[in-house]
Amino acid sequence: MEEQHGFKACMVAPTKIIAGLGMTLGIDVLDVDGATGSYNTALHQKARSICDAMTNNIYDFGFLHVKAVDDCGHDRNIALKVRCKPTSSVPTFGTVQIWRS
């Protein structure tokens, strides 16, 4: 990624298929305690890991994969999807916004 596009990228993706795609593209996959591909993932730790990596000038780009909202759709659990969507986006973007301040 860095040689080809001029920037260094990282990602948090606890599901193997997404992590594998990232690795194929030259994106470093960060290991985060409590990060799962389920509804009970450690969302704040995932966001904090991306922010820390970028704040320390290690990476220029960070990708955070949130699988829980997608899983709700696959499970046809509309009620949980409605509950997960704001839960997954607001704290994460709030954390990222704090990093950018």
Image (tube, rainbow, N blue to C red):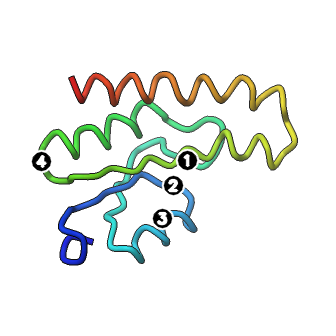
Cα distance in 3D space between marks 1 and 2: 5 Å
Label 3 belongs to which residue? Answer: 19
Cα distance in 3D space between marks 4 and 3: 22 Å
Report if the CB atoms under discs 1 and 2 are less than 8 Å apart: yes
Name the residue rendered at 32%, 43% in the picture.
50
Label 1 belongs to which residue? Answer: 36
Find numbered disc 4 in the image and state the secondary structure of the residue it sits on: loop
Residue 58 image offset from top left, x and y in percent: 15, 53
Say which label, 2 or 3, has the lower sequence index. 2
Indicate the amino acid at tag 1.
Answer: Thr
Residue 101 position (above or below residue 75): above
Indicate the amino acid at tag 4.
Answer: Asn
Residue 73 position (above or below residue 2): above
Report if the CB atoms under discs 2 and 3 are less than 8 Å apart: yes
Find numbered disc 3 in the image and state the secondary structure of the residue it sits on: helix
Say which label, 4 or 1, has the lower sequence index. 1
The image quadrant of residue 49 is: top left
Q: Does residue 35 appear left or right of residue 29 in this picture?
A: right
Q: Does residue 50 appear left or right of residue 66 in this picture?
A: left
Kindly identify which numbered label has been placed on residue 57. 4
Query: What residue occupies the far right of the structure in this picture?
Result: 76
Disc number lying in front (4 or 3) = 4
Q: Does residue 97 appear left or right of residue 76 in this picture?
A: left
Name the residue rendered at 23%, 29% in the picture.
100
Indicate the amino acid at tag 3.
Answer: Ala
Cα distance in 3D space between marks 4 and 1: 26 Å
Residue 52 image offset from top left, x and y in percent: 23, 39
Label 2 belongs to which residue? Answer: 14
Disc number lying in front (1 or 3) = 3
